[in-house]
Amino acid sequence: MKKVIVLILMVFTNTVIFSQGIADALRYSKDNLNGTARFQAMSGAFGALGGDFSAINVNPAGSAVFSNNQLGFTFSNFNIKNNSNYFETLTNTSNSNFVLNQAGVVFVFNDYNPKNNWKKLALSINYENVNNFNNSLFSAGRNPNNSIDKYFLSFANPNPSIGQRGIPLSVLENSNYEDLSYIDQQAFLGYNAYIINPDNPSNINNDTYSSNVPSGTYNQRNFVESSGYNGKLNFNFATQYKDKLYLGLNLNSHFTDLRQSSRFYENNSNSTNTGVSSLRFDNELYTYGSGFSFNLGAIAKITNEFRAGLAYQSPTWYRLFDELQQTLTSTGFNYGNPPNPNLSSTTPDSNIIIAYQPYSLRAPGKWTGSLAYVFGKKGLISLDYTRRDYSNTIFTPKNEFQVANQILGNTLDVASELRIGAEYRIKQWSLRGGFRNEKSPYKNGTTIGDLTGFSSGLGYNFGNTKLDLAYSHAQRNAQESFFSQGFTDGANFRTKNNNIVMTLLFEL
């Protein structure tokens, strides 16, 4: 079928939270450990140190720590491995890609007038790949209880707890897929693929439905593949007061581009030759948009060795656009009118790309407190502590997303992150290491578990050029539901990230 784009002018109540889910809202709220090799080698514990391009993203005062103009580029090889357990069936996937992870330049203007207490002004521009979306998840197993029919029933039947009406039979029989809201579209697919049946088929006002999937056990497979990035370009201004205080400001431009494909397959041992025998449900989602945020920060040199930093990152205000394509094909018995007793298949007329109205997302801000101790020219140790309230993630306009925002507020929680890093210098060589622990953003602590990671690296100073290398590892457990409502069974995942990073720095 020829694909066309149809613009839907519709009220967006509940649409985004159902079509994407909380996990996707978190996708634009979380920051991964990315950036320069030195930054990653020390697990990002740079809030009281500065003098690094990625440190500017943590504390914008850090650019004033640079002693001269610099230009930097970072290249990363991201490797992610996902181990899945779905009803005791184990599967795994891996994904690897090579990207330009960071590029930036800083200009330092020193004031050598001894009567002026403002000693330095620094201006920088830095790009960073905040979140790499390239990933794949595969799960397969034998579900002893639940079919995907519950997903379609949850949209078709009334649900007073969230103010959802039942879908009249006349709507499902006499409408085109592209003319319906997202909720009605899901019911349309289930009905026209013979997965759900009206309880009173002779009444066009019927708004309750039952499953056409035989009871029993179900062989299920789910594959999700995503690609894209969440990037940030910051414009930084920082200054140094005497030799004791550094102050900075970032103005950040965000841009995101995500393509996500999910393919769910189910079959059952249908010995009665009735109802649905097997089905496949494909979803292709394309999300893109831009956003804005700002950072404020300060670094105080309490003594020549001891430093403290405090930084605030504002919420990020995104403007996002969704395009969705869905295809559902089912195979079963007694399809059609009159019913056909032989095995046959059907695909509702839905192979159309729907471009929804744009919507806004406010990702929560965060506070970072930092301490560092510098052992002269020999080395240093640094600690960062960050708090972010993920329950403040909000879709807007609020009146159109009241239920969605309530779900976010009731499900997500305040999460903290601890980062510790150290560096030791031997002539031109620098040896580095780090550790980090990030708490779960969920109140239950299990939908996404705590993250634990470590890192190491080394650097060599050639004079006007520096080369840094780093390796970082992180892992966390998660429970991934295949669908956002109705049929919420999913797999348990253990995700492991292994990244190799190289940075080239040039003094200008």
Image: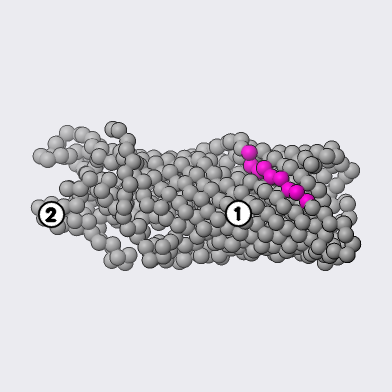
The image's mark for residue 303 is none
Q: Where's residue 170, x and y in %?
A: 16, 52
Q: Where's residue 442, x and y in %?
A: 51, 61
> Looking at the picture, which amino acid does disc 2 mark?
Ile
Q: Residue at x 54, y 37 (%)?
A: 94
The quarter of the picture where the N terminus appears is top left
> Looking at the picture, which amino acid does disc 1 mark?
Asn
Q: Residue at x 75, y 49 (%)?
A: 107
Residue that carries the numbered disc 2 in the rendered image: 204
Q: Where's residue 316, x and y in %?
A: 54, 58
Q: Where's residue 312, x and y in %?
A: 64, 63
- Visible residue check, residue 26: no
Residue 407 found in image quarter: bottom left
Q: Is residue 269 left or right of residue 385?
A: left
Tell which circle, 1 or 2, labels the residue nearer the N-terminal end: 2
Residue 78 in the image: above or below residue 153 = above
The quarter of the picture where the C terminus appears is top right
Residue 147 in the image: above or below residue 362 = above
Q: Give the magenta part as a residue range.
A: 100-108
The image's mark for residue 252 is 1
